[in-house]
Image (spheres, grey):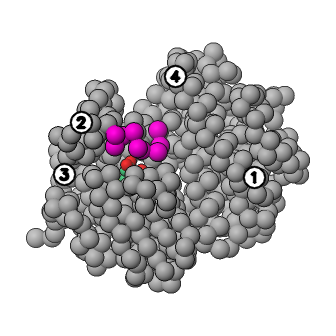
Amino acid sequence: MPTLYHWEPNAGSLEVLAALHEKNIPFESRYVDFLAGEMWRKLSSQEMAFAAEMEVVSNLEIEGPVLATESGAALTDSYFINLYLDDAFAQTPLRPADAESQWRINVWARWIGEELYPATNTLGCAKYATAKLKDKAIETLPGQERQDAWRTAQRGYAIDEIAEARRKIAVMLRRTEDALAKGAYLVGESVSLADFTLLGASLSLPKTAPDQFEGAPYTNAWLARMRERPSVQAALRYARSNAPDESFAPGAERSRWG
Amino acid sequence: MLKLYHWEPNANSGKPMLALMEKGVAFESHYLDLLNFDQHKPDYLAINPLGTIPALVHDGKVFTESTAIMEYVDAAFEGPSLTPVDPIERWRMRWWMKWFDQYLAKSASMLGWSVFVGPSVRARDPEELKAAIERIPMKERRVAWSKAIYNTFSKEELAESTRRLRDGIGKLEAALGARAWIAGATYSLGDANGFNLAYALPLAQPDVCNDEKTPAIMEWLRKIYERPATRKCWALARVPRMGERVKFLERT
Ligand SMILES: N[C@@H](CCC(=O)N[C@@H](CS)C(=O)NCC(=O)O)C(=O)O
């Protein structure tokens, strides 16, 4: 049985937890407090032998879930973990079989991963995490990029960084509105991995960008539908706080170039 | 009917070119001169309104995003599979393609634009350049072009890109020291993706990327360079400096 190391069901943790439940894959859940730097404290106590691996330390998501497979591999990057689950567990496929739909899902994941996740993480960290980031936790983190991401979130965000995050959210909401005006899900007739990726990146938007989110009626209706799915309800039950959508730890940086 | 809109056979353009060559899929090549701003002209904007290259047109449908195009090409056409069978190797292939695209390539590209793309166009008529920048649809690309043209990169961002490149070389060497190919036992899209960027590492950072310090990277680059598909791909280079500079990978 695979083991998922995850935090509160928001962002990448939600994305993978919901897919596991949607596909009905038995797994062991290990709750890790990302914001306290627990993933990395456990690393130094040897509890997670895999945590020193390149794909874990240098995961561009920065703080995100880790799936330990039965064969001993440690997988990171929420969307790629989900693709792995879809490849390795045949039941309830979360991608249509045709190449064009798969391309569409990949493009959504790329846009969301490169633009929306960093933007919602900026707004979320600014509102809920900045004040909680402790030097002591930061000093023990592995990898320059991870340290930099935490320091950036700790010092807080300049007005133009917040404005740029909001601009990216506006661009993405235009795209989701276009797609969801035409159909109930992002790609094809039924729910797909694209929807779970968007779910992770957008669960917090009603709180972090309420004005922008209100102006996106199709995406609103889609989020309400997603939240009603039994798999998403099951994923949200891993929460230990009463507001998982306020749980943010430093995440993917916004693109430095192009 | 298959058409590929591309620039030189490296970076983002080279990714679908090399995938198509490896699959043995014939395509109509539409070369766009990036340095002449062909990608922002109305004819091309009608195909890809974002004004970026590459774009693939298959049976009238437009496909963008170079890495996603590679996966599309592999799934949609006959020919040797460029995706591992093992789900964990597939995961590793995707993980590394993202790391190449969003970590290493961003830094390499920023440096490349500061030393090559910018200087290649800077001497042109300032009014013409100003108008060219204004025509660019995406804000991110407008910022990139204006930094390249007016050379307004900050010292810090160039230093950070150099740091990432040098640090990334060490990480790539470790990965290739552990496995024959980036995803595992077989050549995959991940290797084709990585080559498009990594061929330039020994040229850009010769003191840290060379036969002595990074033998695994050098051997991997040479193995990819000698594949017939890679040869065919690089035969489409038009900028003399581009076609020439990959030749150092020739085994002596
Ligand atoms: N994420 C896109 C990026 C495409 C992109 O930015 N391409 C560059 C060339 S490598 C481009 O079109 N630059 C021309 C411009 O910005 O005018 C992809 O992978 O295809």
Q: CA distance from mark 2 to mark 3?
A: 31 Å
Residue designated by label 4 = A160
Q: Is residue B148 visible?
A: no
Both marks 4 and 3 on one chain: no
Query: Amino acid under label 3?
Result: Leu
Image position, residue B110 (x, y; %)? 32, 41
Q: Residue at x 34, y 40 (%)?
A: B131
The amino acid pointed to by label 1 is Leu
Label pair 2/1, CB-CB below 8 angstroms: no
Residue highlighted by disc 2: B126
Between tags 4 and 3, which lies in front? Answer: 4
Secondary element under disc 2, as helix, strand or loop, is: helix
On the question of residue B116 being in view, the answer is: yes
Query: Which residue is label 3 attached to?
Result: B203
Disc 2 vs disc 1: which is toward the camera?
2
Which residue occupies 28% across, 76% down?
B232
- Residues shaded magenta: B131-139
Q: Distance between the Cα atoms at labels 4 and 2?
A: 28 Å
For label 1, the residue is A180
SS under mark 1: helix
Dots 1 and 3 on the same chain: no
* Dot 2 and dot 3 residues touching (CB under 8 Å): no
